[in-house]
Each structure stands twice: as C-alpha cells, then as structure tokens.
Amino acid sequence: MWCRPRFVKKILLDSLLQEMSIFMRIRSVLPTVRRTVLPSIRLPQIQQTLGFTSSNPLFYDRELMSDRFEGITKKFFIDVKEGQDGKYIKISELNSGRRYTLQILGEDVGTLCDLLEQNTGDHNVEGTHRRYSIRQNSNLGGRYTELIEEGKDGRPHRVTIPEENFHRFLQGLKDMNRFLCEENDKLA
C-alpha cells in the first residue's frame, strides 16, 4: 500500500497555514480598504493591490431582504440578493444537516409564483437565462412540491417543499417578489 511521504504532508500543512495567514491579513485590512480606496472592487483587484493571493472567496452577494421559517423536519431560507448579474432570490432548504439551494433570477420570480399559486400539476418554465421545473409528487411522508433549477453548470438544483409548508413558502416567495418589484420601481 502506497502512502504519502511525510514531507508531502508537511508541505500541504505549510501551504494551508500560509493560506490561513493570508486570509487573516486580508480580513484585517479589507474593511479599511473597502471603505476608503476600493468601494466596489472585486477580489483579484484587491489581491493585486495588497500583493498577495488567496483561494478563499471573500466577496458574497449583498443580501437585501431575508425570510426564514421552519417545518417539522426542515428549515427554509428565502433571501433577496444582489450580485454581478443583478437581483435574484436564493432559496435554501436545510434538512438533516444538508443544505439544498437554488437561485431564481429576479425577472423569473413572478412567473414561478403564478405557477406555484395555481398548484396544478407539473410545469417547465424557460426563464430569461435559466430553466426551472415544478413537480408535484407524493410518498409515504405525504405530498410535496419540488422546485428545480437547472444551474449554470447544467446540474439540477432542487428544493423540496412539503405540503404542510407550501402556503408559508409561497407567501414568503410572494413577499420577496413584491420587494423586488418595489426596488425595481425605485430605480425606474
């Protein structure tokens, strides 16, 4: 059986420690740099300015509004976020320690809300830049609705909403859509 020599393990540990050190330096310098010098700049430019690099993602999309509710076995998070590609809704399901997440682009939220509100059968939606599916199924645990997004990478991202949480989920999604519409009206 082949195993790595000790010096390889030490090199890996050393590079991890260097990465952590760099990350901590960025975290300590970043608030000052962001407020004064670089108000809306991305990670590669900061790395170039400060003279070091890191593989850690330091910039997350800005959260504009958030909602959270719990079911019997699941927790749901519905957030309105703003990123490079515009505003979108991020839906996360936390179930048995696993997180399932999908994103709905701002211009597609209204269509999906209408179809979810109809609550009739399965639907496929061609969004502006992505495809979504709504599937209604049942198993021994009861009826549930699956909301599926075909991600940028082509993989499906899904959230499963049990029947007992469906109305609360739909209300949260409508509230977020209303917020998005109000934000777009302010900009217009």
Image (tube, helix red, strand yellow):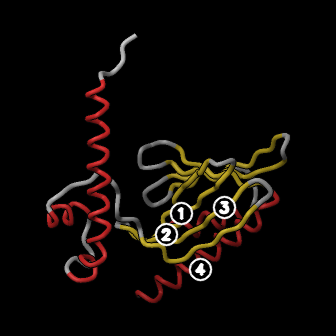
| Res 14 quadrant in image | top left
Q: State the separation of the CA atoms marked 2 and 1.
A: 10 Å
Q: Which residue is mark 3?
A: 76
Front: mark 1 or 4: 1
Q: State the separation of the CA atoms marked 2 and 4.
A: 11 Å
Front: mark 1 or 3: 3
Q: Amino acid at mark 4?
A: Arg
Q: Which residue is mark 4?
A: 178
| Res 86 quadrant in image | bottom left
Front: mark 3 or 4: 3
Which residue is rendered at x = 64% and y = 77% of the image? 175
Which residue is rendered at x = 31% and y = 76% of the image? 31
Asked whether disc 2 touches disc 4, contact meaning CB atoms under 8 Å apart, the reply is: no
Q: 76 or 124: which is nearer to us?
A: 76
Q: Amino acid at mark 2?
A: Gly
Which residue is rendered at x = 30% and y = 70% of the image? 28
Residue 62 in percent (x, y) is at 43, 72
Q: 59 or 181: which is nearer to us?
A: 59
Q: Which residue is mark 1?
A: 90
Q: Amino acid at mark 3?
A: Phe
- Disc 3: CA contacts within 10 A as few (<14), some (14-19) or many (>=20): many
Front: mark 2 or 1: 1
Circle nearer the N terminus (3, 4): 3
